[in-house]
């Protein structure tokens, strides 16, 4: 059964949005790593240790903290790998689209993370025109992705 253009656009947005989701998960893992590293680092110094007043000190990280840190590093590496693979798959599909303007729009929005509202002036004077081109680009993405993998979709995970 053939999907309507609207359904094709919705499918394409969902597939293209997966790259953004993976990148956001990677940012979250990076944040958690930094947070845990701060917790494991030297305690804040109260006064000057040179003068013998106050002092912070260092408390060795616990096994639980080290295990959690390793787990987060592993997650971050997995997100990076998935992001690279998905970006390459996405670019392969986008590069099959014949119209250069449609390719540029998809790359700027879904690879570089630009918003249509911020980039349209470099392409055309009309925001409405770039929105129409974006809609057409999404349909073309759907069509090209199904030409590559007609049984269903690219192997997005």
Image (cartoon, grey):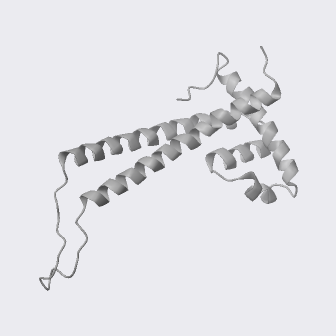
Taking 146 as reference, is 47 left or right? Answer: left
Decide if residue 121 is in sight here: yes
Up the image or down, 117 lies above or below 138; here it is below
Q: Image point 18% across, 45% down: which residue? A: 63
Residue occupying the far left of the picture: 52
- Quarter the N terminus occupies: top right
Up the image or down, 127 lies above or below 16; here it is below
Q: Position of residue 125 (x, y in %)?
A: 87, 58
Q: Position of residue 22 (x, y in %)?
A: 52, 40
Q: Position of residue 157 (x, y in %)?
A: 52, 29
Decide if residue 95 is in sight here: no
The number of discs equals: 0
Q: Position of residue 78 (x, y in %)?
A: 41, 38
Dividing the picture into quarters, in which one does residue 57 lie?
Answer: bottom left
Dividing the picture into quarters, in which one does residue 93 lie?
Answer: top right
Q: Image point 46% across, 46% down: which residue? A: 26
Residue occupying the far top of the picture: 1
Dividing the picture into quarters, in which one does residue 135 lie?
Answer: top right
Up the image or down, 41 lies above or below 27; here it is below
Q: Image point 38% across, 51% down: which residue? A: 32
**Which sits in the foreground, 124 or 100?**
124
Taking 102 as reference, is 63 left or right? Answer: left
Taking 75 as reference, is 89 left or right? Answer: right
Q: Image point 62% across, 51% down: which residue? A: 112
């Amino acid at each position: 059964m053939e999907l309507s253009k609207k359904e094709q656009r919705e499918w394409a947005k969902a597939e293209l949005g997966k790259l953004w989701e993976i990148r956001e998960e990677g940012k979250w893992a990076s944040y958690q790593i930094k947070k845990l590293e701060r917790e494991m680092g030297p305690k804040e110094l109260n006064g000057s240790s040179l003068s013998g007043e106050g002092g912070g000190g260092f408390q060795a990280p616990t096994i639980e903290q080290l295990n959690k840190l390793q787990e987060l590093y592993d997650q971050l590496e997995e997100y990076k790998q998935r992001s690279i693979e998905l970006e390459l798959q996405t670019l392969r599909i986008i590069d099959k689209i014949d119209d250069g303007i449609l390719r540029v729009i998809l790359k700027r929005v879904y690879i570089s993370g630009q918003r249509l509202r911020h980039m349209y002036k470099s392409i055309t004077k009309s925001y409405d025109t770039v929105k129409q081109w974006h809609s057409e680009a999404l349909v073309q993405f759907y069509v090209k992705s199904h030409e590559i993998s007609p049984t269903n979709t690219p192997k997005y995970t």
